Amino acid sequence: MSFETELTRLRSGDLEALTALVERYQNRLYRYLLRLVKQPSVAEDLFQQTWLRVMERISNYDPERNFEAWLFSVAHNLTIDHLRRYRPESLDEPLPSGHTREELLPGTDPSALEKLLVGERKTWIADAITELPVVYREVVTLRFEEEMKLEEIATVLAVPLSTVKSRLHRGLKGLRRLLEKKSEIGAQL
Amino acid sequence: MNEHAEIRELLTLAASGALNADEQRRVEEHLGGCAACKAEFDVWCRITGALQELPTPAAPVGLVERTRRQLVNQAAARKELRWNHLVIGCLIVLGWALTFLTWPVMQLLGDKVAQWLDIPFTTVTLVLIVYTSTAWLATWVVAVLLGRRYQQEGRSV
């Protein structure tokens, strides 16, 4: 069944078409939610809520719009509501690692970082992403893992394109600083 | 901010493929003549490359099936809700129709009913008023109870 056919059937309330889409997007949507909330059980719960919300609102979906952007915007809104309710996070708040946001400015010596990137230590990168503030973490994961265009990310987040660029820039700088810290620690071990 | 510093600020977005054509051209021209910025750009490219190659965590086994069951349950609940709304709507229309029909019928047949039952006409009228009031009161109670039930269902879905 083609994607367009699935969408058409979904809009007419076909539950089988919705299940096919759940299967199609299961890994990507779960990964996105897991990157944001970090806890697998919460990501699972939000995953289910997202599809329930999709079923509720599918009649409002404009087929001219990008379905992926719409789907991820539904997930984004539910996740932000969850984070506000259970884990209010301020940009000025210290990170779990103990660093403040100001400390996430990039360093100047890339040598230790280059060693890290060359080595088999990609898990460090995945760990470092989880330490980024959620607003940066989200843009980084949408851009590089979901491979969305900046315009699509702006649609998902309902923010201007300039905000997406700014968050991407700051997110990458923060990530680099975290990686450099990790590579320094790794070098000392 | 000089040209060198401006380009440095664009390197993250350049490595992310997030610059417009003019900005990208400007960065590339600068990188052609600046080894320090080229080295910095290469580091950013390796970071963004590593991000693109991160393994995708697989969704837990059974998540799709659990989601499908929830969707089926919700679809059934919504269908029942729509059916209930339809039934209530029909009952309301029937109630109004009976109310409006009762009084003309009463005017036509009230005397005959009173004579047949051998009671005063005012008693028949009184019985009808009590009957109508009781029926409408019962309708309001049912409507309130149903409304509260729907609210609870809405929270649990």
Image (spheres, rainbow, N blue to C red):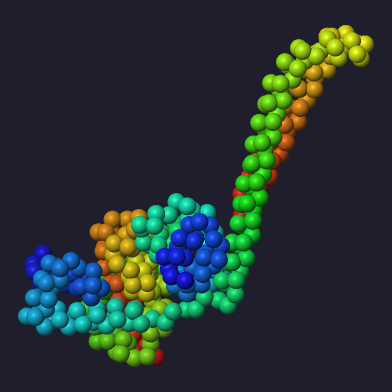
Nearer to me, A19 or A80: A19
Residue A159 visible (yes or no): yes
| Residue found farthest to the left | B33
Kindly identify the residue that appears in the image at 24 percent across and 78 percent down: B44
Residue A143 in the image: state x and y as whole percent: 33, 70
Question: Front-most of A172 and A151?
Answer: A151
Q: Residue at x 40, y 72 (%)?
A: A131
Up-down relation of residue A35 to residue B99 (above or below): below
Q: Which quadrant of the view contains residue B125?
A: top right
Q: Nearer the viewer, residue A172 or A30?
A: A30
Q: Residue B106, image x and y in percent?
A: 77, 15
Q: How many marks?
A: 0
- Indicate the quadrant where residue A42 lies: bottom right
Which residue, as the protein is rendered here, is positioned at the far right?
B118
* Residue A23 in picture, x, y percent from top left: 51, 72
The quadrant the N terminus of chain B occupies is: bottom left
Q: Is residue A27 left or right of residue B80?
A: left
Left or right position of A138 against B38: right
Q: Residue at x 71, y 21 (%)?
A: B101
Q: Is residue B148 above or below residue A39?
A: above
Q: Is residue A76 visible?
A: no
* Residue at image location 66% in from the left, 31% down from the top: B93
Image location (x, y in percent) of residue A79: 47, 61
Image quadrant where one finds the C terminus of chain B: bottom right
Instruction: Specify whether A168 is left or right of B3.
Output: right
